[in-house]
Image: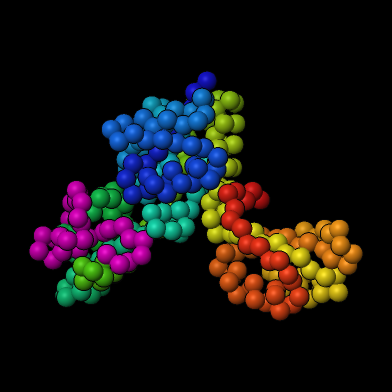
Amino acid sequence: MILKIGLPKGSLEQSTLNMFKKAGYSINISSRSYKPSIDDPNIECLLIRAQEIPRYVEKGIIDIGLTGLDWVIENNADIVTVGKLIYAKQGLKPVRWVLAVSEFSKIKTLEDLNGKRIATEVVNITKKYLSDKGLNASVEFSWGATEAKVPELVDAIVDLTETGSSLKANNLRVLDTILESTTVLISNKESWKSSWKRKKIEDLFLLLKGALAAESMVGVKMNVQKVNLDEVVSVLPALRKPTISNLSSDGWVAVETIVDEKIIRGLIPKLKNAGAEGIIEYSLNKVIY
């Protein structure tokens, strides 16, 4: 059997390929092909815009796909959400759809949007937001470069931001966040009912989730004299107990654990001062909880 998967073409493309590589899958894309090769004979890949993936999954043209939760909502897609995979173009965090106006706009509150024009790629999401807020504004589809359309072409925009740098560069002021979105793995409902496909999907999701978890973690191991063991262990994060094993040299043990990458630069000097020696930091491909 074959599992057809839609991979996002565009901003998420490279980070998705990197994630698959860490999960153990090698994907190759030729410059003119939208059908990447993958080193699993039971998987077939297609490169598709994330905006379109929910529709193709719903129709069963592909079995599963990686897309944004925002595009699932925008398409009102009737699919199975296998799970979230929190990553974006520039980091491991959700992205936001924000309602923004020119820094110099007279629009100061949401109520000031009544009777105004808004451009966005997520027309349905924006219309629902306005309806929920009791606001009456015109919403038009934007084909791109949305942040450049205010104030000359439209009064406000709803646009995607990850870091906020593009908004600042275009002198835009955020009025509200209308949706926070993450990447999700979605499945066609009929595909999910197939025992073979479901097992294949669940195994793939487990590996992808493990690859993402490893992005923010590092392994660290060291040698410690037993007389210093308690002090060294007290320095390590308390979330999980380290692995401790005896060395061939009497009175020495090896200590190994996994920690958040953000703390390792401050942790290593503390471990050294506590008596650890031969400290090694190493990267991880997958962390499966």
Q: Viewer-proximal residue, 127 or 122?
A: 122
Q: Is residue 89 visible?
A: yes
Q: Seen in the image, is 99 located left or right of residue 243?
A: left
Percent coordinates x, y for residue 117 in the rendering: 16, 59
Percent coordinates x, y for residue 39 in the rendering: 50, 30
Percent coordinates x, y for residue 133 in the rendering: 31, 62
Residue 210 vertical position relative to residue 196 in the rendered view, above or below: below
Q: Seen in the image, is 151 located left or right of residue 237?
A: left
Q: Residue furthest top?
A: 1
Q: Is residue 15 magenta?
A: no
Residue drawn at x 60%, y 64% is: 260
Residue drawn at x 58%, y 42% is: 207
Range of residues picked out in magenta: 138-166
Q: Residue furthest front?
A: 249
Q: Residue furthest left?
A: 152
Q: Is residue 156 magenta?
A: yes
Q: Is residue 80 visible?
A: no
Residue 265 in which image quadrant: bottom right
Q: Seen in the image, is 259 located left or right of residue 181?
A: right
Counting every numbered tag in the picture gives 0
Residue drawn at x 55%, y 25% is: 194
Q: Seen in the image, is 53 located left or right of residue 199?
A: left
Residue 264 in which image quadrant: bottom right
The chosen color scheme is rainbow
Residue drawn at x 28%, y 50% is: 122
